[in-house]
Image: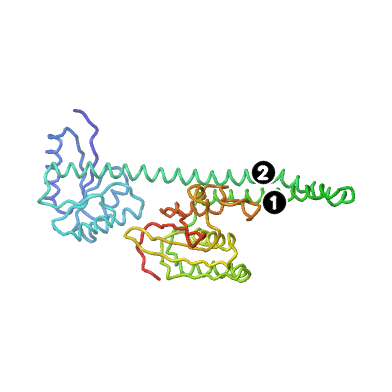
Amino acid sequence: MDTEPIRILLIDDDEEDAFITRELLEDATQASGQRYSLDWADRFDEGLATALEAKHDLVLVDYQLQPGSGHDLIRRARSAGCSCPFILLTGLSDGEVDRQAMDAGASDFLTKGKTDAALLERSIRYSLRHAETLAALTQQARELERSNLELEQFARAVSHDLRQPLHIIAGYAEILTLHYQAALDDKARDMMGKIVSGVERMNAMIEDLLALAHIDAAGESIEDVDCSALWAKVVADLQPRIVSSRASVEASALPVVRGRTAHLEQLFRNLLGNALKFTAHEPPRVSVHCTTAPDHWHFVVTDNGIGVPEAQRASIFEPFERGHSAGSYPGTGVGLALCAKIVQQHGGSIWVEPGEKPGSSFHFTIDGARAQQS
């Protein structure tokens, strides 16, 4: 079977090991029909320079090179942008060497003297498939980033186009009210007020849709986020509303998580803001706590407010879905949709359960419980 040869670079300062590797590849060709072309570099610097030329499909690198190790060579190649798969070869049967190889960027690890032709060929095929998968995922990530950027740009353009007729409507309504005040009866003035109110509400909806598009774009970098400090900042920012509503706000120790600071701040702000807005007759009582699981953090924000009707608990996180009428409580119905987007962005899920009668408990998870409680 005539196949294109797989181009392999061997970086090994031992001539006998290079000969053995060539023999193993020839045996693999006889067994499978897959041809291999092998180039050999016997020095660290020469091998690194050749690997960076990107003329090979795969690199086999010896662990004990001079003046640096195989780990060092792989790290330097990766830092220079080399995406070629590496297989580390060593005479040591050491699990720590294996772990270090993966950390350095190798796709596999083989022990000299314990590797036959079949094992070497399997490792080569696995490493090539692994590299193809990584390349495909990288391309998808780039396309997603480009798509998200286009989405945000489109949302900004649409919001600008939508605002223009709204400004015209609001302007003419103001002119009519100012210049024809005497000619308008109470019913007409009420209608003019509703026009202005509708324009303001539409502007708020456009702003919230733009915020949704911005969350999807997710351009902010991921970092360690101290949720206790972040919650304290949100509480301080909302202090005037907390004081005016005579609310009590409590929090247990919250963790440090990996995430986007501004987005998590918006998540806390929306949930606390809703708890202060959707209140019953008693002063609001709001609490937040967090528990840990092997693979996620579980946050719960509980209030004693008016609650969410059971029929709407599944849809409340959709844009413009509201548990209560806009006339009773102001807002666009996008705040919880923003929360859902942010939680999804952080690898979690969000849902609502009944809290204190008739209050609510908003639960959300964040992926990766790897940090210590603060």
From the viewer's perspective, tell me whether residue 134 is left or right of residue 101: right
Q: Secondary structure at mark 2?
A: helix
Q: Residue at x 59, y 61 (%)?
A: 277
Decide which of 366, 303 is in the foreground and name it.
303
Q: Would you call the spot at circle 1 few (<14 residues within 10 Å), some (14-19), or many (20 or more)?
A: some
Q: Which residue is mark 1?
A: 200
Q: Is residue 256 above or below residue 174?
A: below
Contact between marks 2 and 1 (CB within 8 A): the answer is no
Q: Quadrant of residue 222?
A: bottom left
Residue 91's spot in the image, x, y percent? 13, 56
Q: Quadrant of residue 235?
A: bottom right
Q: Residue furthest top?
A: 1
Q: CA distance from mark 2 to mark 1?
A: 12 Å
Decide which of 305, 76 is in the foreground and name it.
305
Residue 164's spot in the image, x, y percent? 71, 45
Amino acid marked by disc 1: Glu
Q: Would you call the spot at circle 2 few (<14 residues within 10 Å), some (14-19), or many (20 or more)?
A: some
Q: Earlier in the sequence, mark 2 or mark 1?
A: 2
Decide which of 111, 339 is in the foreground and name it.
339
Q: Residue at x 13, y 57 (%)?
A: 93
- Res 325 label: none
Residue 59's spot in the image, x, y percent? 24, 47
Amino acid marked by disc 2: Leu
Q: Which residue is mark 2?
A: 162
Q: Residue furthest right?
A: 182
Decide which of 188, 200 is in the foreground and name it.
188
Q: Residue at x 46, y 66 (%)?
A: 288
Residue 111's spot in the image, x, y percent? 14, 53
**How many numbered marks are there?**
2
